[in-house]
Image: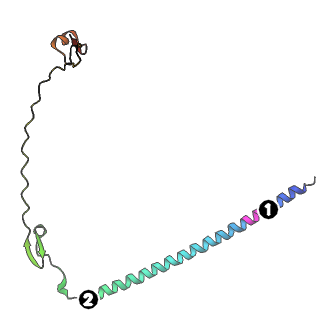
């Protein structure tokens, strides 16, 4: 069984595309690996630079402390609870001023008088008065809603 020339051409193009894809993928992976190595080297250099700076700072701080007089360390002159009540201003000991007294509580307000409920009347002439409350008679008979009187 012989193959069709068009199938061979399609297969050849497919294999060429596959080979090109693999080459591009391999090149990309090499670039990413090189970038990762470069990044790792830069990070290591930054850490090394940071370590050098930290060491130089520590040495300078130690030299500064060695040259400073030993008397410079602060001393606690007051116990903790007394220290909270005192403040230092320009080297002098000052007592904190007493806090102002709390304001007096507000006077109770008088409760307003509530007017007695009045039956509502209709302003429509000829319709009579409309009452919107129940009476004892309504409670006995069972409240039926608003009652009208004429």
The residue positioned 87% from the left and 58% from the top of the image is 8
Part of the protein shown in magenta? 13-21
Above or below residue 135? Residue 4 is below
Secondary structure found at label 2: helix
Q: Nearer the viewer, mark 1 or mark 2?
A: 1
The image quarter containing residue 71 is bottom left
Above or below residue 57? Residue 78 is above
Q: Is residue 116 left or right of residue 15?
A: left
Q: Position of residue 10 (x, y in %)?
A: 83, 57
| Residue on which the image places disc 2 | 66
Q: Is residue 8 left or right of residue 52?
A: right
The image quarter containing residue 2 is bottom right
Question: For residue 83, which numbered disc appears in the image?
Answer: none
Say which label, 1 or 2, has the lower sequence index: 1
> Residue 63 colored magenta?
no
Q: Residue furthest bottom?
A: 67
**Viewer-nearest residue: 17 or 107:** 107
- Secondary structure character of the magenta stretch overall: helix
**Viewer-nearest residue: 87 or 37:** 87
The residue positioned 37% from the left and 86% from the top of the image is 56
Q: Is residue 2 left or right of residue 96?
A: right
> Residue 20 colored magenta?
yes
Question: For residue 15, which numbered disc appears in the image?
Answer: 1
The residue positioned 49% from the left and 78% from the top of the image is 44
Q: Position of residue 15 (x, y in %)?
A: 79, 62
Q: Position of residue 90 (x, y in %)?
A: 12, 79
Above or below residue 13? Residue 121 is above
Secondary structure found at label 1: helix
Q: Is residue 69 left or right of residue 18?
A: left
């Amino acid at each position: 069984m012989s193959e069709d020339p068009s199938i061979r051409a399609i297969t050849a193009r497919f294999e060429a595309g596959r080979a090109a894809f693999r080459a591009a993928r391999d090149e990309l992976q090499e670039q990413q690996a090189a970038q990762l190595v470069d990044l790792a080297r830069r990070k290591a250099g930054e850490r090394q630079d940071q370590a050098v700076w930290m060491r130089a700072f520590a040495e300078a701080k130690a030299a500064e402390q060695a040259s400073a007089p030993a008397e410079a360390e602060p001393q606690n002159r007051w116990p903790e609870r007394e220290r909270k009540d005192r403040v230092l201003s320009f080297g002098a000991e000052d007592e904190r001023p007493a806090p102002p007294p709390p304001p007096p509580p507000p006077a109770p307000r008088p409760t307003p008088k509530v007017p007695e409920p009045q039956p509502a009347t209709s302003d429509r002439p000829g319709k009579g008065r409309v009452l919107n409350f129940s009476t004892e008679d309504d409670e006995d008979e069972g409240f039926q809603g608003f009652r009208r009187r004429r």
